[in-house]
Each structure stands twice: as structure tokens, then as C-alpha cells.
Image (cartoon, rainbow, N blue to C red):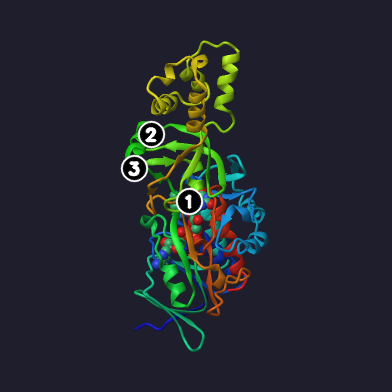
Amino acid sequence: MTSPQFFDCIVIGAGAAGLMCAATAGQRGRRVLVLDHANKVGKKILMSGGGRCNFTNLYMEPDNYLSANPHFCKSALSRYTQYDFLELVSRYQLAYHDKGAGELFCDDKARDILNILLAECETGGVTIQTDTAITAISKQDNEQFVIDTPRGEYQCHSLVIATGGLSIPKMGATGFGYKIARQFGLKVKETEPALVPFTLSDAWLTVAQELAGVSIDISVTCRQQTFNEALLFTHRGLSGPAILQISNYWYSSDEITIDFLPTQSVAELIEQWKTAGEKATLKTLLGHYLPKRFVLTWLGLIAADLGDKLVKQLSNQEIEKLSQFFHHWTIKPSGTEGYRTAEVTRGGVDTDGISSKTFEAKTTENLYFIGEVLDVTGWLGGFNFQWAWSSGWCAGQYV
Ligand code: FDA
């Protein structure tokens, strides 16, 4: 049997948070080892933002995050901000652009972000080892952590769990971090797929399938939270940025309400056309503001001949029904597409048991949890990576 290898700090998980933490600690002079069971590092970085990685958001605020304790994220987000990460990538002359709403993407490819993190790890003398499954973790009487793997035993003074959430198991996601949290006496908040498309069933599924590929700028509301972005009908239900955003707030059996014309009032448009004496049909009027395929299907759901009616012939009752259907469509999704397609996991290690300053577990000295494994979930738009950078950097100061 080979003798154990000793490190000041071992980080489990070579993703966004783990690499940031390792680089930071390494550059403080700590001897750091990163272990990952996958065959490659930073897989989610590489697949993120459609291959261009939406690596932060210029308008990041704590309100862009969900957690049982909404205050937990504030400290780290203010100590390592979006501007700190921009300063880092600018040192490497990364070319990037704002895709709108402050969402910063690489001009070229997500690999550029991973390369920056790896270069920072190299500067810090960090050792990275992939293809290493962890079989057990324990803490000895001498305060060292012991990490057992089929490739040998490792020991360290500080142990960082950066194993992320459950989304995209094919990319190496596991519930390992939650298991270790429980082992050391921490609680784990219930986990759910988030930033995920909704599935529909029965008649509404047939409607969605008919409209698959149609995209509309909508306003969607659930539990008093509203997002104004695009919706996309799919063969399984509803997707698009607006739906992914609201999925963060959605719980099974909740209804969502959609306004398909958030910047116009159907009733007012009809009134204007009536006053102007337009001889147009209802489908012609609505076709000016919404995709024609959607208008025809949607009107057909109210009444077969409604679309062909002249605007001036519409009764008040019909206008009321139209307003309801176009501005307040309420639907109960049958579920979500699950972890297979979810971008993130809502819930995770209960932040009550973690220091918001150091990320150390309150139950166990020198054990740290960072990134998505924690019960902190960001909106779509670069917020989840910013959380990985902020929590990773802050823990990196203490491990
Ligand atoms: P991350 O998941 O990055 O890393 C965890 C690491 O731990 C992995 O390398 C994994 O292999 C390893 N691991 C897991 N279990 C292990 C075990 N048992 N033993 C050893 N190692 C283990 N966010 C954003 O801000 N902008 C974006 O553009 C996108 N785009 C995007 C696209 C897609 C398709 C997905 C799935 C996700 C995004 N995200 C995103 C979310 C973002 O990728 C995510 O929030 C961060 O990667 C989380 O960083 P972590 O380091 O916490 O976990």
C-alpha cells in the first residue's frame, strides 16, 4: 500500500467554483490538489452559454439569487464582484460582449474562460487530477481529512466541497456534496431542477406541439415574481428564457400566468381599429403584433370562426374573453424536463450551517462548501457563474 499524499488543501470538483478556489488558495502559497471523478475539468463551463459562456452579469445584485436565507450570498457577492472577475479576464485580454441586460459572453468560445482558470491554477502551483472517484472521506483525531480513492489515499488540512448540483448527470453531476454535508452534520434543503423547461399534458401538450418553434416576447408570473422575456413552444411544452427564469420560482402544482402581449392591450387595439373604421378581421389585427401561427391557434381555441370576424363586429363579451386569453393565460405545467436539461439545481446544502464569510461548515472546522452545491440559485444571465467565482474566491482566502 502506498503512503498517503499530504496537501494543505484538497478541492473536490474541478468546476467553476472549485478551480477559482484552488487558484486563489494556491496563489496564497497553499499546496492545493483538485480532484474530480470526470475525465475532463470544467465540463459545464465548456457547454455553457451555447458554447460562449455567459460568465457574469454587469447588473448582478443579491436579488438575482434564491435561497432559504436571501442574505447569505450578499457578503461574497460584494467581496468578489462582477468587476473583479472582469478585471481577471481583462488581464488575459479576453474578448467579450454584452448580449443585452448586462449578460457578458465570450466573443469566441467558453474554453477561453476555462483556460484562464487553468492558467491561474498553474500560477498557484495547483495540482489537478481527473478520473478520481472518491470512495470515502473522514476526519482523523489529528484534524487531517482523509480522502480515499482507488488511486490512493490523500490527506489535507482544509477540504473544499465544490461538486455542484444535480443537473446534467451525463456531464458528471452527482449528489456527492449533499452526502458529505449530511455526513458532517449539515442539513440539505430539498433539491429540484431549476432554470428548466416546463412539460404540459393532454390538450395543452397538443397545442404546444402544434406551435413548436414559435417564440413570443411575453410576461410570465408565478408566486408574485414576473419576468419579461421570450417564450418558446416546444414538443414537450414551454421553454425559452422567460420560462427558465420563472421555473426557479415554480413549485409542483403551482399555476403560471402568461401575458402574450405585455406592451399592448388587446381591448384597446380593437377599440382603436373600431374607431378608425378598419374593415380588417381579428386575425389580421392580431397578426400585426404576434406570430400568425400563434394567433390562428389561439383564436381557434376560443371559437372556430373568431379569427375571421371583422373587428367592428366583436361583442364586449368576446373582447373580454380575448383579453383573458391573451393577457392572463393561466396554466398548471404538469412538471419540468428534470435534471436532464435543467441548467441548475434549486436547494442544496443549508446555508444556516455555513459561514457566509469563509464558507466553512459551522459543524466541522476546515470543511468548506462553495458554488452550486449550496442552497443559492441564480437567475439565468451569468448569475450562477458569478456565484461560483465569488464563493470560490472568498473560500480561497481562508482554506
Ligand atoms: P460544476 O457543476 O461546474 O462543477 C462540479 C464539478 O464537480 C464537476 O467537474 C464534476 O465532475 C465534479 N463532481 C461531481 N460529483 C463528483 C464526485 N462525486 N467526485 C468528484 N468530482 C465530482 N451559468 C451561468 O452563469 N452562465 C451560463 O451561461 C450557464 N450556462 C449553462 C449551461 C448549461 C447547459 C448548464 C447545465 C449550466 C449552465 N450554467 C450557466 C450553470 C453553471 O454551469 C453552474 O451554475 C456552475 O457550473 C456551477 O459551478 P460549480 O463549480 O459549483 O459546479
Q: Nearer the viewer, residue 157 or 192?
A: 192
- Where's residue 365, x and y in %? 55, 80
The amino acid marked with disc number 3 is Ser
Badge 2 is on which residue? 212
* Residue lying farthest to the bottom in this orientation: 141
Q: Disc 1 or disc 2, which is closer to the eye?
A: 1
Give the left or right position of residue 330, taking residue 208 as reference: right
Badge 3 is on which residue? 201
Who comes first in sequence, dot 1 or dot 2? Answer: 2
Please rate how many residues cluster around mark 3, counting C-alpha atoms within 10 Å: few if below 14, some from 14 to 19, many from 20. some
The amino acid marked with disc number 1 is Trp
Residue 333 shows in this picture: yes
Residue 166 drawn above or below residue 199:
below
Who comes first in sequence, dot 2 or dot 3? Answer: 3
Q: Nearer the viewer, residue 12 or 235?
A: 235
Q: Nearer the viewer, residue 129 or 244?
A: 244
Per the image, label 3 sits on a secondary structure element best described as loop
Per the image, label 1 sits on a secondary structure element best described as loop
The quadrant of the rendering that contains the N terminus is: bottom left
Please rate how many residues cluster around mark 2, counting C-alpha atoms within 10 Å: few if below 14, some from 14 to 19, many from 20. some
Give the left or right position of residue 332, taking residue 93 as reference: left
Badge 1 is on which residue? 250
Q: Nearer the viewer, residue 221 or 24?
A: 221
Per the image, label 2 sits on a secondary structure element best described as loop
The quadrant of the rendering that contains the C terminus is: bottom right
Please rate how many residues cluster around mark 1, counting C-alpha atoms within 10 Å: few if below 14, some from 14 to 19, many from 20. many
Label 1 CB, ligand 1: below 8 Å? no
The amino acid marked with disc number 2 is Ala
Q: What is the spatial separation of the Cα atoms under label 1 and label 2, in whole angstroms?
A: 22 Å
- Image point (57%, 52%), residue name: 383
